[in-house]
Image (cartoon, rainbow, N blue to C red):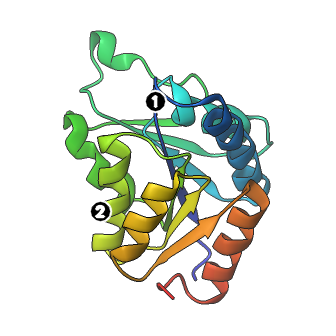
């Protein structure tokens, strides 16, 4: 890989995120930044997105990017306080494609709703590495059945080891 910093997309539930997913996302965001990687989320001030950003912001030298659905006016300006860069797309949920294609690897943290599922599907469709971190069994079975490139992590350290292994392999699906 070039000297460009690795971009790790962390996707997951917003308002409906479980306490476990939020705790994992916060720890994951911190570990991503500690390794010098860029954190990319959906940028909203809720759930997995906000937690990952909080964790990343605790590390000196962090870079946190949020890809937001609105145009950046009025209520659209509501985003996670820890963002270093807010990208306003004006695309609503279609911004999920931008989230995925802007990352080098996508991590789904704790599962989520249709938006998170679409991000996982877009990652697979684009041939990108996809790591499922502490997702429900149904999610694991479904996304693993769709093809190559899916890896399963039970905890944050395992997730980071899988990302590092992907870097060594050139980020191609296994």
First-in-chain label (1 vs 2): 1
Residue designated by label 2: 122
**Dot 2 alpha-carbon crowd within 10 angstroms: few under 14, some 14 to 19, many 20 or more:** many
Q: Residue at point 37% right, 18% down?
A: 77
Q: Is residue 6 above or below residue 53?
A: below
Please report the residue visible at 71 percent of the width from the left and 35 percent of the height from the top.
23
Give the x, y percent position of residue 146.
Answer: 33, 75
Horizontally, residue 100 falls left or right of residue 111, namely left
Residue 71 picture location, percent across and down: 24, 26
- Residues marked 1 and 2 touching at CB (< 8 Å): no
Looking at the rendered structure, the secondary structure element under dot 2 is: helix
- Give the structural element (helix, strand or loop) at label 1: loop
Residue position for label 1? 14
Horizontal arrangement in the rendering, residue 22 relative to residue 100 (left or right): right
Q: Quadrant of the N terminus?
A: bottom right
Image vertical order of residue 44 relative to residue 91, above or below = above
Provide residue 120's location: percent of width, then percent of height.
38, 59
> For residue 44, what is the image quadrant?
top left
Above or below for 167 versus 76: below
Q: Is residue 162 above or below residue 113?
A: below
Left/right placement of residue 174 relative to residue 73 reads right
Q: Which residue does the image show at 48% across and 86% down from the upper left?
A: 172
Q: CA distance from mark 1 to mark 2?
A: 18 Å
Q: Quadrant of residue 5?
A: bottom right
Q: Residues within 10 Å of mark 1 (few under 14, many from 20)?
A: many
Residue 110: x percent and y percent?
56, 45
Residue 70 tag number:
none
């Amino acid at each position: 890989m070039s000297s460009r910093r690795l971009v790790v997309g962390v996707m997951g539930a917003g308002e409906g995120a479980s306490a476990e997913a939020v705790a994992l996302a916060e720890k994951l965001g911190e570990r991503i930044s500690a390794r010098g990687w860029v954190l990319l989320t959906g940028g909203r001030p809720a759930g997995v997105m906000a937690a990952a950003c909080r964790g990343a912001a605790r590390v000196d030298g962090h870079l946190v990017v949020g890809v937001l659905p609105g145009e950046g006016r009025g209520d659209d300006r509501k985003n996670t306080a820890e963002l270093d860069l807010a990208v306003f797309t004006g695309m609503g949920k279609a911004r999920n494609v931008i989230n995925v294609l802007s990352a080098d690897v996508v991590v789904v943290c704790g599962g989520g709703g249709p938006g998170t599922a679409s991000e996982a599907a877009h990652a697979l469709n684009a041939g990108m590495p996809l790591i499922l971190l502490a997702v429900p069994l149904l999610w694991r079975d479904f996304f693993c059945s769709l093809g190559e490139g899916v890896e399963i992590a039970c905890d944050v350290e395992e997730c980071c080891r899988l990302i590092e292994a992907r870097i060594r392999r050139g980020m191609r699906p296994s």
